[in-house]
Image (cartoon, rainbow, N blue to C red):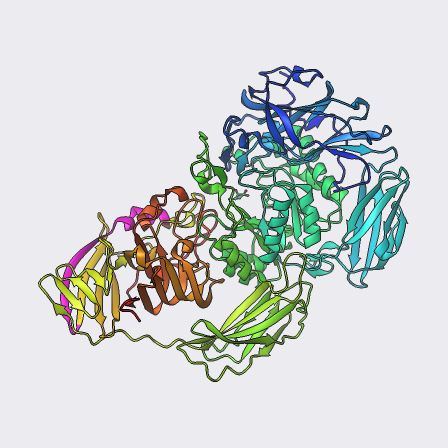
Amino acid sequence: MSLPYFESVSPGSGTVPPRSWYATSSAASLSLNGSWRFRLSPTAEAEDDSFARPGYDASGWGEITVPGHWVLQGDGAHGSPAYTNVNYPFPVDPPRVPTENPTGDHLRVFDLPDTWPADGESVIRFEGVESCAKVWLNGTELGDFKGSRLPHEFSVGGLLQEHDNVLAVRVHQWSSGSYLEDQDQWWLPGIFREVSLLHRPDGAAADFRVHASYDHRDGLGTLRVETTTPAARVSVPELGLDLASGEPATVPVQPWTAETPRLYDGEIRTAAGETIPFRAGFRTVALEDGLIKVNGTPVLFRGVNRHEFHPEHGRAVGLDTMRRDLLLMKRHNVNAVRTSHYPPHPAFLDLCDELGLWVIDECDLETHGFVFDDWRRNPVDDERWTPALLDRARRMVERDKNHPSVLLWSLGNECGTGAGLTAMARWIRDRDPSRLVHYEGDPSCADTDVYSRMYPPHDEVETIGRYEDEGPAKRRQLPFILCEYGHAMGNGPGGLADYQRLFEAHDRLQGGFVWEWIDHGLNHPGYGFGYGGDFGEELHDGNFVCDGLLFPDRTPSPGLVEYKKVIEPVRIHGDGNGDSSADTVRVTNGHDFTDLTHLAFTWSYEVDGESVATGPLTVPPLAPGQSAEVKLPAPPADARGSEAAWTVRAELAEDTAWAPAGHLVAWGQLTAAPRAVTAAATGAAPVRDRDTITLGPAVFDARTGALRSLGPIQVPADGEPRLDVWRAPTDNDDGAPWQPDARYGLLWREAGLHRVRHRRDQVALDDGALVVRSRVAPAASQLGLATEYRWTADDSGRLTLSVTVTPEGDWRIPLPRLGIRFGIPSTYGETATWFGGGPGEAYPDTRAAARLGRWQSPVDALQTPYVRPQENGARADVRWAELTGPDGGGLRITGEPEFWFTARRWTTEQLDAAGHGTDLVPGDTVWVNLDHAQHGIGSQSCGPGPLPQYRLEAAPATFSFTFSALGRIGH
Ligand code: GAL
C-alpha cells in the first residue's frame, strides 16, 4: 500500500536546500503574515485540492491569523488544544496516523509590490508549520514538508505574477512527523511562525557561513565568511576588514562570551548587489581536559529549558515575548538556555547573541511514546526514518550555524537509542566541527561530547563530580551537565541550592538547566489558565504541563526568585564566625570571564529589619574565581534593638542591554547582633466564670478550653488555635510514579492527616496557666500526637501559647507541617506586616532568597497563584507578624523560636480541593498557620524528593507564640 505524503516517512519533497536565517537583507521581501482564508476539515481527504486553483471562491470560508494555531483561534469552533506528556494521543502504528486528522486549508491571495524585481528567483519561506503541509502557488503544487519547528523554502520565481497570486497551504495536524514530535507539550497545529516571500537576486548568496574563532592565548580572532557565491565581499568596518568570500583574517578582537556578548557588525555584498548584514561574535568552543571550554575557560551553565509558549498564542510567540523571556532570564542570573525540544524561532537566537546566553540548540525530535513498548519500532532505530532525521539535523544546523551563542547541538530529546541518532551526530560533526554534540538519552554517550542527565539525585551528581561514577570508559571522561533538573511544577523546586553547591565544588559538573522556563497554562474561558483535561481531551496528563519558573502570564514564580539567588555569580558570605558579630564579609567572584568592576557594592546595617545606615563598600575588582575578605565599617553606635544584621548588595554599576544601573545581582546577609529571646507573657491569673475562663486579654470556653476572644477580636467558630499538621499537597509532595522516593503526598492522605480529630483530654488551671491536653489523631490508625496547649498572659494584654507535641505510635512518614492554625475575622486580616524572611514564599529547601527584613503585603498578595492550587505562601524565619484591618485593628504574633507564617482567606481543605485558582473564593475568615516546622519541597513531581535534612520527622517539639490585639486596646 502506498501511503499518502503525510504518512510517508519521507521528510517531504520540493523544498530547496536549507540555509542560514538572517533578519534582513537588501533584497526585496514580502511578509505573508496576517489574515488568511481558512477551512477546517475533520480528515485529511475530506476535501479535494481544488481550493488551490486560481479563481476558487473561498468567500464562504472563515479567517485565521497567520502566524497562529487554529485550535487557539475561533473560540472553540476550530477544535481544541490537547496535552499529553509521553503518550501519543493516537494509536501507535508508525508511520500511520488516524483517519480523524484535522486538516486546515489556508488561502492567501497577494499582489507583488510594484518594486518587486523582475529578474532573479524568489522563494516562499515557512518558518514553522505543525505538523505537515502541502503547498501550491497559483495552482501549481510546490511540494510538501514535515518538521514543525524548522524552516522550509520553495522556489517560486517562475510562478509569480503581479497580481492575485494564490498561495494555498494544506496543513494536517497528524503526520508521520508527529511520531518525531512527542515533546510533552500541547499539540497545536497550524502555521505558527512567519510566512514570507523573499527575492533572491541573480548571483545572490544562496547561503553563507560566518566562522569567527578566538584564540585566548594571543587575543586574536579569526574571521572567515564563506558564501555560496564566490563573487562576494565581506566587510567588518570596526575591524578594518574587507575580505573576499572565504578569505581569512586574524586581528585583535574582544571575544564573545555570554557575560560579554561582544558582537561586530559586518556586511556581505554580492556581485549582484545584495547586502546582508551579519554579526560576528568571536569565540571558540572545545572539549579540553574533559571540560567544555569557551575561549580556553571552562563554563558553568546556570540554565533553563525553554519551550516557546504564550498563554493566548501557544507557540506563536512574537519578538516582544522572546525579548521579554531573555530579559527576565538575564535579570535572574540565568546564563544558558536549552531550546527544549526543538529549534526556537530563529530571532530568539539573534537575541541570545545580543544579550549573552549560552545555548544548547536542540533538534525538533522526540519519540518518547515508544518507551511503553520497549522502544520497539522506534523511528530513530529504523533506517527508513533516517532521511527524515538527517533532514531535521540539517535544517537546524544550516539555519542556526552563524550564532555565537550556540555552543552545542542537541540531537533531540528522549528518543531512546538508534542508528538514526548516530547518523545525525556524524552529519553534524562533519558539517560543523566547531561545536559540541549533546544528547541525553543514550547512556553510552557514544555520539556525544558531554555526559548529560536529567533529574538524578544530589548524591549521584556528587559521585559523578568526583569521577567516582561507573559506566562506559568514554563517559567517565566526559564533562557532566544536567540537561534537566529542578522540576518547577507547582510549589518548588526544592534543593536547588544543594545542587549548586555541588556544581561549584566539582569542576566536572558544569551546571544544569532547570525544567522549565514557563508554565504552559492556556487561557481558558472558565478557569483562568487551563491545563491538560480542561479542553475535553480523552487522554491527557493534567497539570504536568504547568512546571515552569514563570506563571503562564510570565510573572516570575517564587521558584525563579529562588533560582536567581542560588545561581548568583557573586557570593557574599559571613566571615565564618557563626552568629558572633561580623566585621568582614567574604566576596567571591563566580563569573567565568569578567571581574567585578561592573558591579557596585553597598552595605546596609539593619536593626530589627529596618535599615539604619547604609554606604558603599569598596570591593577589589577580583578576577573570576577569586575571593577577598572585605572589611565592614564599624556598626552605628546608637543603633538599638533586639537584633541586627548586615546586608551587602552587588548591583549593576551602569546600565546594560538587559537591566538598568542599580539592578540587584547578588546579596548576602550577616548577623551583627543575634536575636534576643522573647519572654513568655506571665503574671495574669486565670479567672473562671460559669462558662468562661478569662486570662489577661483572652476569654476561653471553660468547658472546652477553646479561645473565644482576644481583646476585641472574636474568634470565629472552628477558628480556635489548635495543632495542624496538614498542608494541601504540592505536586512535588504527590510525586511521580516513576520516582523511587516515597510519595508522601499520597501517604499523608492515606494516613488520614487531612482528617485528624482532636480529642480533648483535659482542661485545667495550673499555676497561673490554662492547660488543655488533647490527642490529635486520624481514624483507623494508632498514630497520634499528644498535644499540650499551655496558655499564660500578663496584665499588659499579651497572651502566650506554648505547645508541646509528643508523637505516639510508629510514625514512618514525616509530617507535612507542625504548628497551629486559627482563624480571625477578615476585618482584622487585610494586611500582613512581618519581621522575618521575605518578601516571597519560602520552604525549608527553597529558602535561599528569603531575606531577613521587615515586610508588608496584603494577605491576598501572600498567595502564590500556582495554576493548580496547592500549599503555598509561607514566609520563613518570622520573628513577629501583624495582621491588621483597614482601621489598624488586628493581631500581633511573636514566635519563640522563629516560625513559618502563612495567612489566607480560605482553609487548607478548600485549597486542597481546588483544581484551579477560580475555585478559591475568599470567606469571612482569614486562616493563619504558624508553623514550627515544614517538610521540604523537593522536586519529586519528576525528580528526587527532599533531601533527608529537609524531612520533618514526627518528634517531640515545643514552641510558643505570644499574641496581642492591636488597635483600640492594642500596643
Ligand atoms: C523530561 C522531559 C521533558 C519534560 C520533563 C517533565 O523527561 O525531557 O520534556 O517532560 O521530563 O516535565
Q: Position of residue 271 (x, y in %)?
A: 91, 39
748 falls in the magenta region: yes
Q: Position of residue 412 (x, y in %)?
A: 62, 41
Residue 476 visible, this angle: no
Q: Which residue is at the front of the view, 480 or 492?
A: 492
Q: Position of residue 881 (x, y in %)?
A: 36, 65
810 falls in the magenta region: no
Please name the residue shown 65% across and 26% down the image: 133
| Magenta stretch bounds | 745-768
Along the horizontal axis of the image, is 42 left or right of 152?
A: left
Q: Position of residue 897 (x, y in %)?
A: 34, 70
Q: Which residue is at the front of the view, 893 or 360?
A: 893
Along the horizontal axis of the image, is 869 left or right of 272?
A: left
Q: Can you say which quadrant of the picture contains the N terminus?
A: top right
Is residue 846 positioned above or below 185 on the image? below
Is residue 387 positioned above or below 578 on the image? above
Instruction: Identify the residue at the far left of this view.
Output: 690
Is residue 758 positioned above or below 534 on the image? below
Question: Based on the displayed image, in which of its 4 quarters is residue 250 positioned?
Answer: bottom right
Q: Can you say which quadrant of the picture contains the C terminus?
A: bottom left
Instruction: Identify the residue at the far bottom of this view.
Output: 637
Q: Which residue is at the front of the view, 457 or 835?
A: 835
Along the horizontal axis of the image, is 745 left or right of 547?
A: left
Residue 703 visible, this angle: yes
